[in-house]
Image (cartoon, helix red, strand yellow):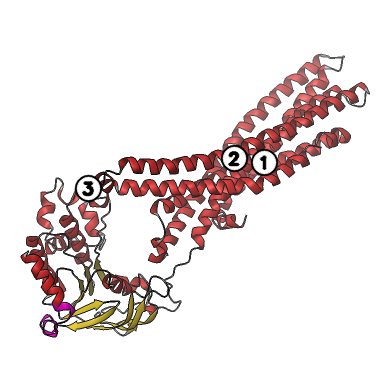
Amino acid sequence: MKSFQFVFQYLKKYSGVLILTVLSMLLLVGVQLLAPWIVKTMVATVTSFNMVQSDMQEITKLALLALGVYITRAGLQFIRSYMAHIAGWSVVADVRSSLYEHIQRLSLRFYENKQTGNLMSQLINDTDLLENLIAHAIPDLTANILTLLGVVAILLRVNASLTLLSILPVPLIVLAMQAFDKYVRPAFRTRQRKLGELNATLNDNLSGVLEIKAFTREEAEAVRLKGHIMQYRDSMLYALRLMATFHPLIEFSSSLGTIILIYFGGKFILGQTLAIADLVAFFLYLDLLYQPVREMSKVWESVQQALAGAERVNELFKEAPSIIEKPDAIPLPEGSKGTITLYNVSFGYEKGIPVLRQINLQIPHGKVVALVGPTGVGKTTLVNLIPRFYDIDEGSITIDGFDIRDLTIKSIRQRISIVLQNIFLFHGTVRENILFGRQDATEEELYLAAKVANADEFIERLPEGYDTMIGERGVKLSGGQRQRIAIARAVLKNAPILILDEATSSVDTETELLIQQALEKLMVGKTVIIIAHRLSTIRNADLIVVLEGNQIVEQGTHQELMKENGLYKRLIEVQMNSNLA
């Protein structure tokens, strides 16, 4: 049950609803216990052999009382059910919101080994099971226990010996529930894991539908997905098979009580130690006695499913971010210029495998620094360390003299505009995607940002201009158009530090020239870091830093590096020859 403890902190918020649920539940149990008493009284009246007019009046009163009981029961059932659902879905909503906020705080390292579909399954499917637990399982379990205790108390007053004989099978049922707890919950946990794997594969395939079609992998991917579907089906059927064995066992055990009552009840009547009305009441109350027991077996199934889901949700809550902000972290002061210094910086995604080693680099305020080098030398990794997407293993990184580990993460990232190599646009309008850079921007600022990014002309040609829906990940736009919207988003943010990671990689030569001219205006007064494979775009950089083999091997201006006859010059010559060819 430890995995479910986190839910109780959310339940506290809805204590008023829970109190109303419990009160209606208590009244409902009391009302249900009245019905057999009414029937018992009626049977005693009609079997008295000396009925008079007053007895008929008594029966009429009993019938009216029964009518009132059933009307009241219906009303209380509505209150209990609706209040329980309010609590259940409210808790699910709170858990989902908190869980999303939690995973948003987790570092990029966490996402590297996670599939989006699996995370979505934990966030939606697993939390969904909590509602069933709160709105159904817990109220039903509580009501059943109260009913059980109430019935036993009444039957003990009617005939203690017959009561004790009738409840003999109950311990067998309890033992069966404990035994199945050992097997059923792991089965449902496996089922939830298989559901997560199915969602993850489906999400990957839907996101990569273009690649699947391009490589004619439709049949192979259909077979792979079917494999996950079958695994989920088999895990579900295994869990249900356990429950299918469990329920008949409970039903059979509860029927033993009826057999005992038939035998000993008849014996007591023949021995004239039990009245017929009491035996009728016993049968009615016995049904109320074993109905909760039978219901508890079904409730137990819901509990096992919910606990399996709660364990997976709790696993996410237990994940701790690898990027931890100090308790006494301070915000980067307003008006910071953006001078960046890397001192003896080393970093690796895995221990013992450095991607960057002993990096020393000074990036002055207002200067343009370009990072170049062969693919895989750590250029993108280096710029990802500055906003603390990852924490360095050794050394220090400072902005205007402040170690970034002493600053609040939010204040660092607010001072940095980034155009990433892999562009991500959200499903929505062009306007919404550009405003993602700064929500409070005016219309004039929005249009200016689009103009600077050379995006205004193509946007105005779209069917609905800035209000055109661009589809998931901007699928309705070309690569160059997506790139320019991403640049406009960064322009609008207008942060003192600008990082361009292959910012012109997806545009044609003419558009690249226009963007370069716009970026030159944007760069004035900013600290700019450019990563570019097209070396012609960074010739005018104030400093070019060449990386190879996880280290800086050269740095200087274009003219200085060309004189050194090193790696930079070889890269330039290779690209020139490639262009000529």
Vertical placement of residue 12 versus 418, above or below? above
Residue located beneath label 2 in the image? 80
The quarter of the displayed image where residue 76 is located: top right
Q: Which residues are magenta?
A: 558-569
Q: Nearer the viewer, mark 1 or mark 3?
A: 3
User: Do the CB atoms of the residues marked 1 and 2 lie less than 8 Å apart?
Assistant: yes
- The answer to which of 47 and 88 lies nearer the viewer is 88
Amino acid type indicated by mark 1: Ala
Specify the principal SS of the magenta part: helix
Question: Looking at the rendered structure, which numbered label has been put on residue 469?
Answer: 3
Whether residue 367 is visible to the viewer of this picture, yes or no, is: no
Alpha-carbon span between mark 2 and mark 3: 45 Å
| Magenta stretch: includes residue 31 | no
Q: Nearer the viewer, mark 1 or mark 2?
A: 1
Asked which secondary structure carries label 2, the reply is: helix
Residue located beneath label 1 in the image? 143
The quarter of the displayed image where residue 500 is located: bottom left
